[in-house]
Image (tube, helix red, strand yellow):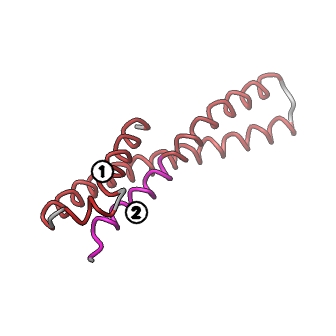
């Protein structure tokens, strides 16, 4: 998904990066690109929601395992905490990329739909 959002961002930057490219586009083409962009934004928003749920779940489990380590220190509980932390870090990174990518796609959509 990271490759897909980065490819989409690069394509939108090429299309909307400089004002000259946008000014040279006719309205029908701008509307078509904006409609396609809305579909992509919808896909990424769905992915973002799923990863938010997974990331929050892992964060809650990590906090609970940390509490378990404090209340009942056992090697298995420490191992579980480390495992959850190792999994949580990539989830946070992936969610960060999705969140920032979608926010950037919003700005590209705004550029495509603003009137001169």
Judging depth in this view, the residue of 13 and 107 nearest the camera is 13
Judging depth in this view, the residue of 28 and 37 nearest the camera is 28
In which quadrant of the rendered view does residue 31 lie?
bottom left
Give the percent coordinates (x, y) of residue 52: 52, 49
Task: Name the residue located 26 percent from the left edge and 62 percent from the top edge.
Answer: 22
Task: Name the residue located 17 percent from the left edge and 59 percent from the top edge.
Answer: 32
Give the percent coordinates (x, y) of residue 51: 49, 45
What residue would you read off at disc 2?
Answer: 107
Please tell me whether residue 101 belongs to the stretch shown in magenta.
Answer: yes
Judging depth in this view, the residue of 103 and 81 nearest the camera is 103
Picture layout, residue 21 above or below residue 1: below
Q: Which residues are magenta?
A: 98-115
Q: Residue furthest bottom?
A: 116
Give the percent coordinates (x, y) of residue 64: 73, 42
What residue would you read off at disc 1?
Answer: 40
Apparent side of residue 7 relative to residue 101 in the rendered image (left or right): left
In which quadrant of the rendered view does residue 116 lie?
bottom left
In which quadrant of the rendered view does residue 35 lie?
bottom left
How many residues crowd around disc 2 within 10 Å: few (fewer than 14), some, or many (20 or more)? few
């Amino acid at each position: 998904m990271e490759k897909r959002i980065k490819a989409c961002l690069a394509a939108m930057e090429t299309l909307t990066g400089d004002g000259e490219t946008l000014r040279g586009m006719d309205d029908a083409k701008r509307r078509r690109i904006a409609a396609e962009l809305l579909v992509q934004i919808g896909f990424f928003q769905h992915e973002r929601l799923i990863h938010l749920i997974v990331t929050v779940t892992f964060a809650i489990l990590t906090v609970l395992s940390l509490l378990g380590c404090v209340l009942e220190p056992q090697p298995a509980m420490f191992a579980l905490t480390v495992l959850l932390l190792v999994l949580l870090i990539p989830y946070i990174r992936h969610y960060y990329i999705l969140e920032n990518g979608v926010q950037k796609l919003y700005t590209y959509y705004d550029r495509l739909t603003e009137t001169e």
